[in-house]
Image (cartoon, helix red, strand yellow):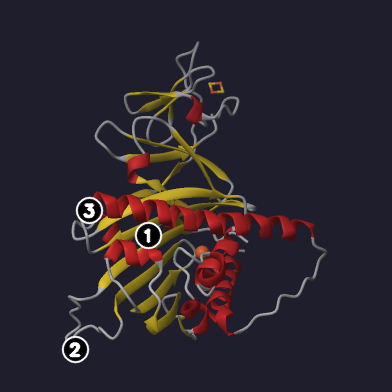
Amino acid sequence: MFVRDQWYVAAYGYEVGRDLLSRTILGEPLVLYRTEDGEPVALADRCVHRRYPLSQSHLDGDTVVCGYHGFTYDRTGACVAVPGQRRVPRTARVASYPVVEQDSFVWVWIGERERADESLIPRAPWLADPAYTTVSGMEPLAARYELLVDNLMDLSHETYLHGGYIGTPEVAETPITTEVDDKNGVVHVSRHMADAACPPFYARSTGIEGRITRWQDIEYHPPCLYLLHSRVAPAGVLPNADGSDPDGFHVEVVYAITPETEHSTLDFWAVARDFALDDQGVSDFLRESNRTVVLQDVTALNILERVIATEPEGYQELSINIDTGGLAARRILKRMSDVRS
Ligand code: FES
Ligand SMILES: [Fe+2]
């Protein structure tokens, strides 16, 4: 169930440069690069001549020269030169995709070009904010994106799948509240733990010893952007009445969930923190820990994808309270894909 006419994260800005980068999004093969003046470009990754991948080709200035017979495309996808003749066929062009670089991501519009509206791109401002330090990565997932949405909307799994990293008993024990903002198409899920064990992920990064107050506030902007506002502080320490929060530690966990094919997903993850900004040891620790946690999810979701592939039609899941956010996300995704079909 793909949702077209949407913005998707294709890459981090730092991945897109003067080397050709291939990425598949919603089953569409793309090639990404940066022009000499630094603008990101996304074109269809199939030469119009004999469909050779342009990502296997090379750049000449701002044009891509096909690595097979030399058809040459400009940044709009128009073919500007072919070998052995002066006249370039009028239909010689590859699709180009609207691209916006924002909050350290390169967003690509998949759908009808006329409907691309930059103002619809959801924001993750921490990732490019000097008041935060960010670690990030991307793991390919051999599972459909809906499984990752489910996974992220229900963090009670932290207790079981990520015990010893970010999971403690209180996560699974504490009930959630869920709110669906239908007007803006956003799902909010919150879990506030007043007095919880501090998992190593936060103990080692913040230096807090002992129990913590731990808040998890999720905002899912379907289909692609997932935000987890995480606040930890020594148990009982709350923000001030005016909203300032000098004694809280804030971690903004950002995922971009980009369907690659019907059975694979690009799992972009980033962790931005507002403390220990220059501490390389903390950065290294958070990068390694979070990557380990993401890979624990990847392993579990890859298993689930294989299970689904072999099961008979009509398997009935059983849902409980913890699934409220995930079910709301599914409804919104379904509605978005219905609108398009
Ligand atoms: S396939 Fe690209 S030029 Fe022939
Ligand atoms: Fe997880």
Q: Which of marks 1 and 2 precedes in the sequence?
A: 1
Alpha carbon distance from label 2 to label 3: 30 Å
Alpha carbon distance from label 1 to label 3: 39 Å
Q: Amino acid at mark 1?
A: Asp
The numbered mark at residue 297 is: none
The numbered mark at residue 117 is: 1
Q: Nearer the viewer, residue 18 or 209?
A: 209
Residue 92 pos. (x, y %): 51, 29
Residue at image point 49% right, 54% down: 267
Q: Amino acid at mark 3?
A: Asp
Tell whether circle 2 marks a residue whose Cβ is less than 8 angstroms from ligand 2.
no
The quarter of the picture where residue 186 lies is: bottom left
Alpha carbon distance from label 2 to label 1: 38 Å
Give the left or right position of residue 157, taking residue 282 as reference: right
Q: Which of marks 3 and 1 precedes in the sequence?
A: 1
- Is the residue marked by circle 2 packed among few (<14), some (14-19), or many (20+) residues within 10 Å? few
Viewer can see residue 258 = no
Q: How many marks?
A: 3
Residue at image point 48% right, 21% down: 71
Q: Amino acid at mark 2?
A: Ala
Q: Nearer the viewer, residue 221 or 88?
A: 221
Mark in the foreground, 2 or 3 = 3
Residue 207 pos. (x, y %): 27, 66
Residue at image point 25% right, 84% down: 238
The numbered mark at residue 241 is: 2
User: Circle 3 is placed at which residue position?
Assistant: 279
- Is the residue marked by circle 1 packed among few (<14), some (14-19), or many (20+) residues within 10 Å? few
Residue 94 pos. (x, y %): 49, 35
Give the left or right position of residue 301, taking residue 229 as reference: right
Quick one: SS at disc 1?
loop
Residue 23 pos. (x, y %): 50, 41
